[in-house]
Image: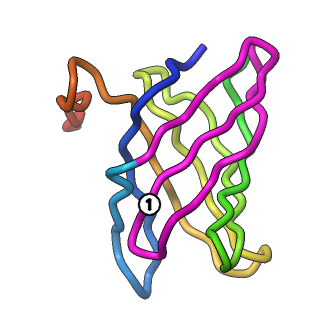
């Protein structure tokens, strides 16, 4: 359902504001398994999770090396993005949005409503 390769996105936390995830990749296997890795302001991380191959709903754990894990629960927005909520220990939470990078480094354009 989703393309494997480079992705961009952001997560938002009240204390830190909107934080970009510029350098990461996601790989989607035909059995629904998700793997990936990247770096953001917290540090180096690895993604592991599953994606429902029909609905596009997913759950992923973002494990920072030597640090905490973050749970991501999301779904397709119908425009090629994955949107949802992240949480740490079920206490700290916020929104996220991820999208594949197309045509080299050119991201999908933001949709202004």
* Magenta range: 24-53
Q: Is residue 81 left or right of residue 31?
A: left
Q: Is residue 48 above or below residue 32?
A: below
Name the image quarter holding residue 65.
bottom right
On the rendered image, what quadrant is the N terminus found in? top right
Name the image quarter holding residue 8.
top left
Q: Nearer the viewer, residue 1 or 26?
A: 26
Name the image quarter holding residue 48.
top right
Q: Is residue 71 left or right of residue 45?
A: right
Q: Where is residue 30? Give x, y as percent.
A: 74, 12
Q: Where is residue 13? Give x, y as percent.
A: 47, 75
Residue at the far bottom: name it. 15
Q: Is residue 63 above or below residue 17?
A: above
Q: Residue at x 48, y 53 (%)?
A: 38
Q: Where is residue 108? Give x, y as percent.
A: 25, 28
Q: Is residue 50 left or right of residue 99?
A: right
């Amino acid at each position: 359902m989703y393309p494997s390769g480079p992705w961009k996105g952001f997560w938002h936390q009240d204390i830190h504001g909107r934080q970009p995830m510029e350098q990461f990749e996601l790989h989607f296997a035909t059995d629904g398994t998700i793997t990936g890795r990247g770096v953001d302001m917290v540090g180096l991380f690895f993604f592991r999770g599953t994606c429902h191959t029909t609905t596009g709903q997913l759950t992923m754990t973002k494990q920072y090396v030597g640090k905490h894990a973050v749970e991501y629960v999301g779904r397709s927005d119908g425009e090629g993005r994955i949107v949802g909520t992240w949480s740490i220990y079920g206490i700290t939470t916020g929104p996220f949005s991820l999208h594949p990078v197309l045509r080299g480094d050119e991201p999908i354009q933001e949709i202004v409503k």
